[in-house]
Amino acid sequence: VQLQASGGGLVQPGGSLRLSCVGSGFSLDDYAIGWFRQAPGKGREGVGSIIGSDGNTYYADSVKGRFTISKNNAKNTVYLQLNSLSPEDTAVYYCAADIDIVGGTAEAEYDYWGPGTQVTVSS
């Protein structure tokens, strides 16, 4: 199982980005995928998750209404749409896979992690 997040970059406050998480070595139908982030000097924070089979999503309160998780099973890819970004959203963003298909924002639930992608929100 491998995961690769991409799509990060520098964006101005109020802007948007779409991150992608491409999975290999497994079928998205059989996992839940979570998104996490780690800001400089802080611990890793769960952003949200999606169930690969039915698309049910869950979001942390801090991003609810601004971030959206979606998927394309044919491409084995999960997306994280980030809108209305603020400097507080600056972090390295990671995706992770949960074989128990529980999802949520608890790190311990996830079995496989990919390298992160940097998102910087600054004017």
Image (cartoon, rainbow, N blue to C red):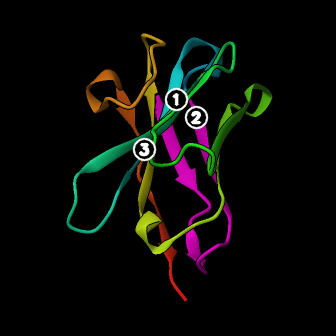
Q: Which residues are magenta?
A: 1-24
Label 2: few (<14), some (14–19) or many (≥20) C-alpha neighbours in 10 Å: many
CA distance for labels 2 and 1: 10 Å
Decide if residue 14 is on the left or right side of residue 117.
right
Based on the picture, tell me whether residue 33 belongs to the magenta stretch: no
Q: Where is residue 40 drawn, in percent x and y?
A: 27, 68
Where on the picture, by quarter, is residue 93?
Answer: bottom left
- Mark 2 or mark 3, which is nearer the start of the sequence? 2
Taking 82 as reference, is 61 above or below it? above
For residue 114, the mark is 3
- Mark 1 or mark 2, which is nearer the start of the sequence? 2
CA distance for labels 3 and 2: 9 Å
- Front-lying residue, 6 or 65: 65
Label 3: few (<14), some (14–19) or many (≥20) C-alpha neighbours in 10 Å: some
- Front-lying residue, 63 or 48: 63
Q: Where is residue 81 drawn, in percent x and y?
A: 67, 51
Decide if residue 98 is on the left or right side of residue 68.
left
Asked whether the residues under the numbered discs 2 and 1 touch, taking CB atoms below 8 Å apart as contact, a structural biologist would say yes
Residue identifier under label 1: 33
Q: Where is residue 95 drawn, in percent x and y?
A: 47, 41
Residue identifier under label 2: 23
Which structural element holds mark 2?
Answer: strand
- Amino acid type at image mark 1: Ile
Where on the picture, by quarter, is residue 26?
Answer: top right
Asked whether the residues under the numbered discs 1 and 3 touch, taking CB atoms below 8 Å apart as contact, a structural biologist would say no
Asked whether the residues under the numbered discs 3 and 2 touch, taking CB atoms below 8 Å apart as contact, a structural biologist would say no
The residue that appears at 69% across and 13% down in the rendered structure is 54
The residue that appears at 52% across and 48% down in the rendered structure is 63
Taking 97 as reference, is 85 above or below it? below
